[in-house]
Image: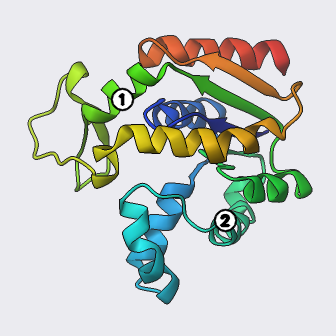
Amino acid sequence: MRISLMGPPGSGKGTQGDRLSEALSIPKISTGDLIRAEIASGSDRGKEIESDFHRGKLSPPDLVVSLVQARVEQQDCSNGFILDGSPRTVEEAHFMQENGLVDIMFVLDLPDEVLIERMVGRRIDPSSGKTYNVSLGLPDVDLVTREMDSDPRARIQEFKSKSLPAISMFRSDIRIHVNGVGTPNQVYIRIIEALLRRW
């Protein structure tokens, strides 16, 4: 089963992707993680995109496509995978469709006000990469705010202008919109119920 999990920044894609990955025993593939690894490798391409990436700008589609293609060819993806936040652009969507990388797509829908509140309250543990939110309580560790969360409205607008057209390219019978408002557990139950109805 090849799942695409989409939604604007702050919608909870990563959290839901982790839970689905565990439940279905298939890997979650985060394009953000793939790009962070490319930057950490010190490659010329990583250095080229580092500044824009940390400001929350979308990375070049050809880079994302090449990283995703290499990742899905690995052995642990043979029974399926979860694409966390991909495709983000029309170019990526074309690649996904041409290579049959999406069997079902879940799109988390939330009002802008909720997304902004979540992004403003988001904190990151730099040692583990785990995300927390001030509204849900914080652990007793040193946390940081990501630069990319400093302008939530711009990130939401970029999602609407670039990612929504990519999402709309997929047939309505495989594209399922899910109410993303509520606790992580409430949203997870909605996704599972939708998956069971469709699969």
Q: Quadrant of the N terminus?
A: top right
Residue highlighted by disc 1: 116
Determine the residue positioned at 41% across, 27% down. Answer: 115
Q: Quadrant of the C terminus?
A: top right
Point out residue 73 in the picture as x, y percentages from the top left corner: 75, 65
Determine the residue positioned at 56% across, 56% down. Answer: 31
Dot 1 alpha-carbon crowd within 10 angstroms: few under 14, some 14 to 19, many 20 or more: many
Classify 13 as above or below 49. above
Viewed as shown, does residue 67 lie left or right of 148? right
Viewed as shown, does residue 43 lie left or right of 97? left
Point out residue 32 in the picture as x, y percentages from the top left corner: 49, 56
Residue 133: which disc?
none
Amino acid marked by disc 1:
Ile
Residue 96 at least partly seen: yes
Dot 2 alpha-carbon crowd within 10 angstroms: few under 14, some 14 to 19, many 20 or more: some
Depth check, front residue: 2 or 88? 88
- Residue 52, image quadrant: bottom left
Residue 61: which disc?
2
Q: Earlier in the sequence, mark 1 or mark 2?
A: 2
State the scheme by which the image is colored: rainbow
Amino acid marked by disc 2:
Pro
Depth check, front residue: 146 or 81? 146
Classify 180 as above or below 131. above
Viewed as shown, does residue 25 lie left or right of 173? left
Classify 104 as above or below 64. above
Q: Are marks 1 and 2 in contact (CB under 8 Å)?
A: no
Determine the residue positioned at 60% across, 29% down. Answer: 23
